[in-house]
Image (cartoon, helix red, strand yellow):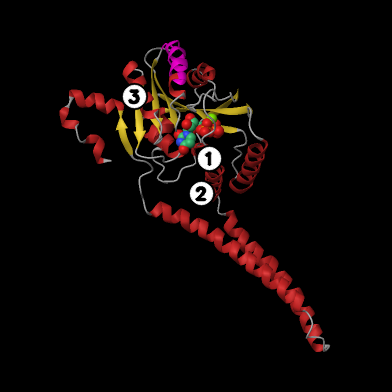
Amino acid sequence: MGLDMDLIVLMPFFNEEMQIPVTVERMIPLLDGLNLHYSLLMIDDGSSDGTWKAIEAAAREFPEKVRGISLSRNFGKEAAICAGLDTADADAVILMDGDLQHPPESIPEMLRLWREDGFEIVEGVKSSRGREGFFSKIQAKLFYGLFRRLSGYDLSDASDFKLLDRKVVAKWRMLSEHNTFFRGLSAWLGFKRTTFFFDVADRQTGKSRWKISGLIRLSVHAITSFSAIPLHLITLIGSVFLIGTLILVVQTLINYFSGEAASGFTTVIIVNLAVGASLMISLGLIGTYIALIFDEVKNRPRYIISEDTRSVRDLNIRPENATKGKES
Ligand code: UDP
Ligand code: MG
């Protein structure tokens, strides 16, 4: 691996002020040892604590090695990844969690698979999920099972720990959807890909930034943006009801002609409730897709960058760029 290659390691951070120094301290010596041009691209996803200050301090300490970008508010990890991939200009980009739950020790192996074996996407697969709660394990199983059935992509134990070749990053930028699901979309992109296994490390500071509501939102979004099968399920439910209807029509008519038509109120109530519930669920399902379309047609940017430690330094050299950061 020579100095002709450059690498960007991209990390999103949300409220991780304690973690930043730990991460920088661990990453810099490790990356220094690789003998290639690199920089650490740290995205502050609109944190409300001192994360941005910590990133700025790291960028001041290692001006050539650390670049920080701050989003104007918390846009979510997916958007932070997009901001990073749009900014990263390098032969390879490695995306990993800022909390170092993705072990940096895997980086040399990732680079080897890319450089020597010619793989364009190198993906980390969790060989163990680390210390994760029972419910989040169940939730993950459920989500990936559903995702595989509906979209045809098996992402079980997949992670966001990936190396992407420059080519892949360029194609990623051509994807126009505003709500992204990195894991799914990077599988969709294709390219020569391989996997490596890693053990999810424990967090050294803080705790998981995900709230259950955010995970549900991401799951629903991931499934609806990769599959229209739920919509077809509505037709299926309708068909099942149609069969039920035919049976009940025959029964009701027989009762009518044999003079027993007055009874059967229980049936009416049950059928009414069943039809009502399935109609509501179907409407909700269609609504979910409409919301997705609505979100897309509004065509808002995926994220807004409010600060960039590099352009701050550029500003000192080229005053004509002074308004650059404010345009976005
Ligand atoms: N993160 C982010 N924006 C968010 C939530 C999380 O940038 O809205 C970052 C977070 O700082 C961390 C990474 O994404 O570096 C993974 O998040 P977390 O550790 O909370 O998730 P988990 O490891 O539990 O999946
Ligand atoms: Mg984590």
- Residue displayed at 31% across by 19% down: 60
Q: Which residue is mark 2?
A: 225
Mark 2 and mark 1: span between their CA atoms? Answer: 10 Å
Where is residue 104? Give x, y as percent. 51, 19
- In terms of secondary structure, where does tag 3 sit? helix
Residue type for callout 3: Glu
How packed is label 2: few (under 14 Cα within 10 Å), some, or many (20 or more)? some
Mark 3 and mark 2: span between their CA atoms? Answer: 36 Å
Mark 3 and mark 1: span between their CA atoms? Answer: 32 Å
Q: Earlier in the sequence, mark 3 or mark 1?
A: 3
Q: Which residue is mark 1?
A: 184
Assign the N terminus to one quadrant of the image.
top left
In the depicted structure, whether residue 4 falls above or below residue 131: above
- In terms of secondary structure, where does tag 2 sit? helix
Residue type for callout 1: Gly
Q: Are marks 2 and 1 in contact (CB under 8 Å)?
A: yes
